[in-house]
Image (cartoon, rainbow, N blue to C red):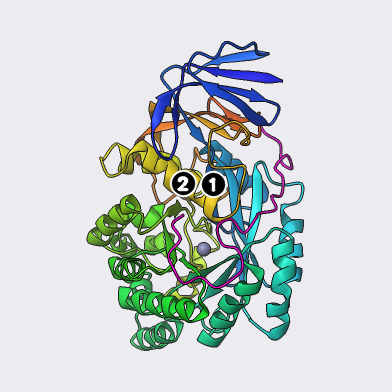
Amino acid sequence: MRTLLRGGTVVSAADQFRADVLIEGSRITQLGESLAVTADQVLDVAGCLLLPGLVDSHTHLAMPTMGTVTADDFNTGTAAAAAGGTTTVVDFALQTEGSLLAGLEAWRERAAGQSHIDYGFHLAVTEASPEAISEMQAVVDQGVTSFKVFMAFKGSFMADDEQLLRVLRRTRETGGLVQVHAENGDAIEVNIAEALGRGEIAPQFHAKTRPDSTEQEATARAIHLARWAKRPVFLVHVSSAAAVSEIQTARAAGSPVYGETCVHYLTLTEDELARPGFDGAKYVCSPPLRTLSDQAVLWSALRQQSLQICTTDHCPFNFCGQKELGKDDFSKIPNGLPGIEHRLTLLHEYGVRAGRLTMPELVRITSTAPARMFGLDRKGRLAPGYDADIVVFDPESHMTITARGHHMAVDYTPYEGWECRGAPVTVFSRGEVVFRDGELVSTPGRGQYIRRTPGPFGPGEVDSLRWV
Ligand SMILES: [Zn+2]
């Protein structure tokens, strides 16, 4: 099957240019102006932008946590991703019953036969026992080349400094990248106990007990530990100007420190948590939403590549029955926001159309950089030999985000009623159309597990900055 996309504008991480794209089977085979080739079908995509399918390297599908399970599974979550132009997810598997390999097995079972798009995993190390550390090589051998350590959530996911350092050091042998959730879990635990003791139970106190200094301190500590381990480190969901400044200082000194932010930190503020009634619970996530001035710093950090990636940290919980678990105690509100479906549209509206990002920068932070950093060697670019994961994007189409209209299996959206310009018209995954004209045309289970390579983060000691 040969499909020719005729008359579009290809956007890469560096520039944009008029080009036709030829898809043969699952790959892109030719790209150039006015290609003189025959094809089984020719699609006129004049007026549209052609983007490499987006990579969302931070999702939590079917994840058990805080006494419940995230609302989207691999079927509904990846359907929503595809509808929004995301063609690859890298989801977080959790260490299970002490074992990394058992965790990976559990997540592979969850995804099997369910996913609409290609997927890989990171492995979250929640207890860095000698057994778990020794399993890291087998995990990398299965194509899981990144690990995550939580410096927060005491009593459940949190690891101490010794554990984080041991995981970092082990990657000298195994290769791969360690990702860190940087908040000071001990201090936050004290803050929460004191707040509840004062009767402060409402959602807004979630943010007040996790001030930006708790993120800043943990970010600086994670960077020190990585430096002592002589390994690169990646800060997930950076939310504050204070944390960005630690990353910038480290990078200026030549340290291989990387990071991401998420769409909600760029578009929402902590004021949402003070909504009337219990509505603020819809906006509870960790780290919490911050301020407008933090947003400005995050946008510029993405532009300047102090932060390399923008993900969703899609971690959806229904308002009814799930967020409500914390009705009488903010610390019991499941942490996380839905967002897997609307990253492209929101970044187009509030980034590109607002003059904060160029279209190539959008492609870089949502597709090319995550593919490169997380070892997805055939994703993230429109070029011969790469997978034909392609978004045909109409920058002029109007879209109103509503919970009623979205594909996610969650009963609200933080962006209810927001009007945006720009949406996917057609989405290809490995040469197959998975979304067209507002309709999902895919089947669960067509997505494939991707064995990732260590990408730029092979084994060994790293002293100097290696730009990705
Ligand atoms: Zn997360």
* 320 left or right, relative to 241: right
Q: Position of residue 423 (x, y in %)?
A: 44, 32
Up/down of 50 relative to 57, above or below:
above
Q: Position of residue 225 (x, y in %)?
A: 47, 80
| Quarter of the picture holding the N terminus | top right
Q: Quadrant of residue 442?
A: top right
Q: Nearer the viewer, residue 212 or 360?
A: 360
Residue denoted by label 1: 55
Q: Position of residue 147 (x, y in %)?
A: 60, 68
Magenta: predominant secondary structure element?
loop
Magenta region: 442-468
Q: Nearer the viewer, residue 343 or 414?
A: 343
Image disc number at residue 366: 2
Classify mark 1: helix, strand or loop. Answer: strand
Q: Position of residue 60 (x, y in %)?
A: 58, 59
The type of residue carrying mark 2 is Thr
Mark 1 Cα within 10 Å, few/some/many (few <14, many 20+)?
many
Badge 1 residue CB within 8 Å of ligand 1: no
Mark yes or no: residue 440 visible: no
* 210 left or right, relative to 68: left
The type of residue carrying mark 1 is Val
The Cα atoms of the two marked residues, 1 and 2, are separated by 6 Å
Q: Nearer the viewer, residue 238 or 197?
A: 238
- Quick check: marks 1 and 2 in contact, CB under 8 Å? yes
